[in-house]
Image (cartoon, rainbow, N blue to C red):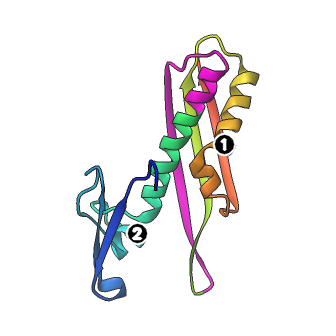
Amino acid sequence: MANGRKASARWEGRGKAGKGTISTETGALANHPYGFSSRFADDRKGTNPEELVGAAHAACLAMAFSFACDKAGFETASVDTTAQVRLVAQGEGFAIDHIALTLDARVPGIDEARFAELAQAAKQGCPLSKALAAVPEVTLKATLHH
């Protein structure tokens, strides 16, 4: 696969009692722990799939917004994004039903209307937004700082 990156996961044990590790090709994560308690309880040492999806979505949105601004002739001084991913029980399993995106940026010389337009376009156009199109609700709160 051209330009693709690889990540891997290993799981050992049964269900709630099991433990896993996640690794990425770049080494950003190297056998990082995850498990039931880091996904559904209060374990803050381990990660979980939703946190990783959120990190990827936030990073993708920041880049897409910066590229959109650049194409429109504006320089992004800073772009801070977050993605809060909500996992809910659904039937016998679980589903991601909401992703709340926030984008806070400093873009000299841009007006509020153009800023909002470029932020929404970035939300719609970033590859992670497209990949997560099955999520029923994806919101964006964009704030321009002067």
Is 134 displayed left or right of 53 in the figure? right
- Residue 85 falls within the magenta-colored stretch: yes
**Can you name the residue that lies furthest to the top here?**
109
Query: The residue tagged with tag 1: helix, strand or loop?
Result: helix
- Residue 99 falls within the magenta-colored stretch: no
Q: Position of residue 124 (x, y in %)?
A: 69, 44
Q: Position of residue 83 (x, y in %)?
A: 53, 48
- What residue is shown with label 2? 39
**Can you name the residue that lies furthest to the front here?**
2
Which residue is rendered at x = 69% and y = 57% of the image? 137
Query: The residue tagged with tag 2: helix, strand or loop?
Result: helix
Front residue of this view, candidates 91 and 121: 121
- What residue is shown with label 1? 125
Q: Mark 1 is on which residue type?
A: Gly
Front residue of this view, candidates 11 and 103: 11
Based on the displayed image, in which of its 4 quarters is residue 108 positioned? Answer: top right
Looking at the image, residue 11 lies above or below residue 121: below
Looking at the image, residue 17 lies above or below residue 63: below
Q: Which class describes the residues within 10 Å of circle 1: few (<14), some (14-19), or many (20+)?
A: some
Q: Position of residue 50 (x, y in %)?
A: 47, 62
Q: Which class describes the residues within 10 Å of circle 2: few (<14), some (14-19), or many (20+)?
A: some
Which residue is rendered at x = 39% and y = 53% of the image? 5
Front residue of this view, candidates 120 and 16: 120
* Start-end of magenta stretch: 65-91
* Residue 34, label in figure: none
Is 76 displayed left or right of 69 in the figure? left
Disc 1 versus disc 2: nearer the observer: 1
Front residue of this view, candidates 118 and 127: 127
Q: Position of residue 79 (x, y in %)?
A: 51, 29
Which residue is rendered at x = 61% and y = 43% of the image? 126
Is 32 displayed left or right of 15 in the figure? left
